[in-house]
């Protein structure tokens, strides 16, 4: 019987379960003193073979753990590229700024001061009553 699985534990477990059922059925029907059946004998022999195969595989694995062969990359020499010659760029002429563009933006501090002044003015202003 060819064994194709990497681990024999599942096969040994299945064989043990079937063997247990065979022994239990024999003892129930014929008694514990009866001779084992052919099925029981073949199951015991198969289980013994599986356990021996497991021990052999473990010994083989422990004896000579050979490293796997790995592919080696060969570095190719890089060819230097020729430098590209670029045409010289024309000098940019600075355009005069518009009146709007020259205006400076207010800073964060100035914005906060303006907001605080607006809040103070709103608090101090006289509130009109809803009745009038």
Image (cartoon, rainbow, N blue to C red):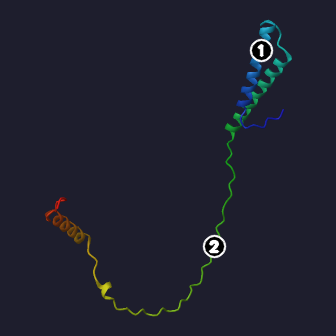
Q: Is residue 127 above or below residue 39?
A: below
Q: Nearer the viewer, residue 8 or 10?
A: 10
Q: Quadrant of residue 96?
A: bottom left
Q: Nearer the viewer, residue 120 or 129?
A: 129
Q: Residues within 10 Å of mark 2 (few under 14, many from 20)?
A: few
Q: Is residue 63 above or below residue 12?
A: below
Residue plotted at (13% across, 64% down): 126
SS at circle 2: loop
SS at circle 1: helix
Say left or right for 110 vs 35.
left
Q: Residues within 10 Å of mark 1 (few under 14, many from 20)?
A: some
Residue 59 in the image: state x and y as whole percent. 70, 34
The residue under label 2 is 77
Q: CA distance from mark 1 to mark 2?
A: 72 Å
Q: Is residue 64 above or below residue 35?
A: below
Q: Quadrant of residue 102?
A: bottom left
How many numbered discs, if any?
2
Say left or right for 102 vs 27.
left
Mark 1 or mark 2, which has the lower sequence index?
Answer: 1
Residue plotted at (83% across, 21% down): 42
Q: Residue furthest front?
A: 132
* Number of the front mark, 1 or 2: 1
Q: Is residue 99 above or below residue 29?
A: below
* Quadrant showing the N terminus: top right
Residue plotted at (16% across, 60% down): 129
Q: Quadrant of residue 109?
A: bottom left
Q: Nearer the viewer, residue 50 or 65?
A: 50
Q: Nearer the viewer, residue 6 or 111?
A: 111
The residue under label 1 is 23
């Amino acid at each position: 019987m060819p064994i194709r699985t990497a681990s024999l534990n599942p096969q040994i477990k299945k064989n043990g379960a079937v063997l247990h059922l065979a022994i239990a059925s024999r003892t129930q029907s014929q008694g514990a003193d009866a001779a084992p059946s052919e099925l029981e004998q073949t199951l015991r022999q198969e289980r013994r073979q599986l356990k021996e195969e497991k021990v052999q595989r473990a010994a083989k694995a422990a004896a000579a753990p050979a490293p796997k062969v790995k592919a080696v990359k060969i570095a190719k020499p890089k060819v230097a590229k020729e430098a590209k010659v670029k045409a010289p760029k024309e000098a940019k002429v600075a355009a005069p700024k518009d009146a709007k563009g020259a205006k400076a933006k207010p800073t964060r501090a100035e914005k906060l001061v303006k907001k605080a002044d607006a809040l103070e003015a709103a608090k101090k202003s006289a509130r009109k009553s809803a009745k009038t």
